[in-house]
Image (cartoon, rainbow, N blue to C red):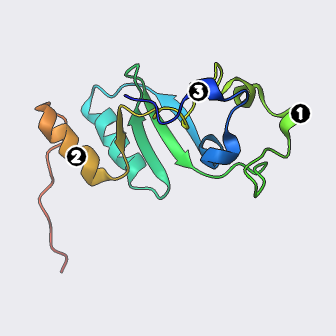
């Protein structure tokens, strides 16, 4: 994937220029789904607001919670910069390895429908059988 910007021109991360994209979500690696239950779990995640599931360029699966960091100032700078967590310190280094320069997503699902379309294209037997609808008296 081509890089969006040239990392060589930056001495520090261009957080104010990109809007601090990395400070607007939390992503946790999950097991690669292999069973019907695990595929159904992904569907369940995607039924919730502000949740995405993605596969990175190393084929690792993640659940992404779209939520803004409490330490992100209006100018896209960290108000806790000197005491920020190590994960924040490590993100984007070496220069050019953050979302500003390249998308972390190989695949991304923002809805159940998008995930189901993708899974149907794979040809895998991933669905539980649908239960017949019942009518209530």
Closer to us: 81 or 6: 6
Q: Secondary structure at mark 1?
A: helix
State the CA–CA distance, disc 2 to disc 3: 36 Å
The residue under the point 58% across, 27% down is: 7
Work out which residue is located at the far front of the displayed protein and give it: 9
- The residue labelled by disc 3 is 7
Q: Please state the total of marks drawn on the protein image.
A: 3
- The residue labelled by disc 2 is 116
Q: Secondary structure at mark 3?
A: helix
Q: Secondary structure at mark 2?
A: helix
Relative horizontal placement of residue 80, taking residue 137 as reference (left or right) = right
The residue under the point 15% across, 54% down is: 131
Label 2 or label 3, whichever comes before in sequence order: 3
Q: Is residue 67 above or below residue 30?
A: below
Label 2 or label 1, whichever comes before in sequence order: 1
Relative horizontal placement of residue 108, taking residue 130 as reference (left or right) = right
Determine whether label 2 and label 1 are within 8 Å by CB.
no
Q: Which mark is residue 21?
A: none
Determine whether label 1 and label 3 are within 8 Å by CB.
no
The residue under the point 70% across, 23% down is: 90
Residue 105 image position (x, y, % from top left)? 41, 34
Work out which residue is located at the far right of the displayed protein and give it: 82
| Badge nearest the viewer, 2 or 1 | 1
Determine whether label 2 and label 3 are within 8 Å by CB.
no
Q: Residues within 10 Å of mark 3 (few under 14, many from 20)?
A: some
Q: Which mark is residue 82?
A: 1
State the CA–CA distance, disc 2 to disc 1: 43 Å
Label 1 or label 3, whichever comes before in sequence order: 3
The residue under the point 41% across, 19% down is: 58
Residue 70 image position (x, y, % from top left)? 76, 51
């Amino acid at each position: 994937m081509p890089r969006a910007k040239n990392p060589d021109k930056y001495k520090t991360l261009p957080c104010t220029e990109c809007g601090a994209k990395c400070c607007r979500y939390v992503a946790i690696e999950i097991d690669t789904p292999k069973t019907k239950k695990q595929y159904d779990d992904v569907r369940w995640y995607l039924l919730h607001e502000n949740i995405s599931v993605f596969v990175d360029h190393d084929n690792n699966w993640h659940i992404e919670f779209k939520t803004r960091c409490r330490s992100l100032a209006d100018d896209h700078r960290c108000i806790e910069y000197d005491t920020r967590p190590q994960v924040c310190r490590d993100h984007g280094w070496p220069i050019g390895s953050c979302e500003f320069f390249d998308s972390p997503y190989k695949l991304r699902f923002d809805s159940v429908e998008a995930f189901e379309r993708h899974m149907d294209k794979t040809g895998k037997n991933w669905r539980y059988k649908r239960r017949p609808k019942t009518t209530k008296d």
